Each structure stands twice: as C-alpha cells, then as structure tokens.
C-alpha cells in the first residue's frame, strides 16, 4: 500500500524552467506511476502546504496537514484489513481466568522443584 500527500489549495504554480510551470492538481513529492495498478495508492490532500517538500515533511503533523485525519484513517483501515485473515478469524481467545490459573500452576511447579533440589543437596552434603 502507498499512502501519499499531494498539494491542494495552498499550492501556487511553481516555475521550474524558462519554458514552463508545474500545474495541475496532482503535485506530489515523488513521481507516481501512470497507472495505479501497482498496489493500493491512497492520497491525502494537504491544502495548507505551499510546495511538495513542505507537504512531504509535514505529512504526519496534524497541525500542518489538514489531510492528516484521512491519512491516518486510511492507514488504520489498511492495517485492520491486513489483520483479517483465516488464521485470525478462526483463532480463540484465552480468558483471563485461564491465564491466571496457568501462572499459579507453573509457579507452584517451579517452587516444588526448587525445594526438592534443596533437600537433596542437604542430604548429600557432609556433616
């Protein structure tokens, strides 16, 4: 998945050479592929940034990027979608009571082993 920021209302046309300017609605920090079939491409528009570099650098700053909420919402949605698979959907949850009971059994078992080792050591030691 590719989440990216593009310039919005805050961007003015940018002169790049004597021959022309960069115009249009799809001004981004990086060049995007002509076709978007190379995975998921999701944009978040930054209407505050004046140029591509500022839009890129403030991508994750809510105060500087009005499109931050959409960006984080899209990211969260993708992560949730990726986690929904057969393994996850078919797994079972261990309850808190089962986990506490397991810990108590394990701790008692370890304690009993230590006592037995201590008793054996005392019996073998010379008097």
Image: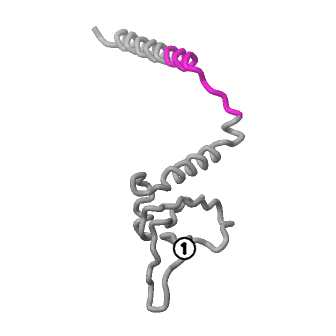
Residue 71 percent location from the top left of the image: 53, 53
Q: Residue at x 58, y 18 (%)?
A: 98
**Residue under circle 1?**
31
Quarter of the image for the C terminus: give it: top left
x and y, in percent, of residue 124 in the image:
36, 12
Q: Locate the N terminus and report the quarter of the image it occupies.
A: bottom right
Q: Nearer the viewer, residue 83 or 18?
A: 18
Q: Is residue 116 left or right of residue 126?
A: right
Image quadrant in which you'd find residue 10: bottom left
Please report the residue visible at 56 percent of the width from the left and 71 percent of the height from the top: 26
Image height of 24 relative to 61, above or below:
below
Q: For residue 118, what is the image quadrant? A: top left
| 88 lies above or below 62 | above
Q: Nearer the viewer, residue 90 or 18?
A: 18
Q: Position of residue 72 (x, y in %)?
A: 52, 50
Check residue 94 for magenta coloring: yes
Name the quadrant containing residue 61: bottom left
Instruction: Tell me the chief SS of the magenta region.
Output: helix
Read off the magenta span.
90-105
Establish if 76 lies above or below 11. above
- Which residue, as the protein is rendered here, is positioned at the far bottom? 18
Left-right relation of 27 to 57? right
SS under mark 1: loop
Q: Would you say residue 80 sits in the magenta stretch?
A: no
């Amino acid at each position: 998945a590719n989440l990216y920021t593009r310039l919005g209302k805050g961007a003015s046309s940018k002169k790049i050479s004597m021959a022309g300017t960069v115009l249009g609605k799809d001004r981004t920090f990086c060049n995007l592929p002509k076709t978007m079939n190379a995975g998921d491409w999701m944009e978040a528009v930054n209407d505050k940034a004046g140029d591509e570099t500022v839009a890129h650098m403030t991508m994750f700053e809510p105060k500087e990027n009005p499109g931050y909420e959409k960006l984080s919402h899209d990211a969260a949605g993708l992560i949730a979608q990726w986690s929904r698979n057969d393994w996850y959907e078919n797994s079972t949850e261990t309850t808190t009571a089962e986990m506490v009971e397991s810990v108590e059994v394990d701790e008692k078992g370890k304690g009993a082993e230590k006592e037995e080792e201590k008793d054996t050591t005392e019996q073998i030691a010379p008097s």
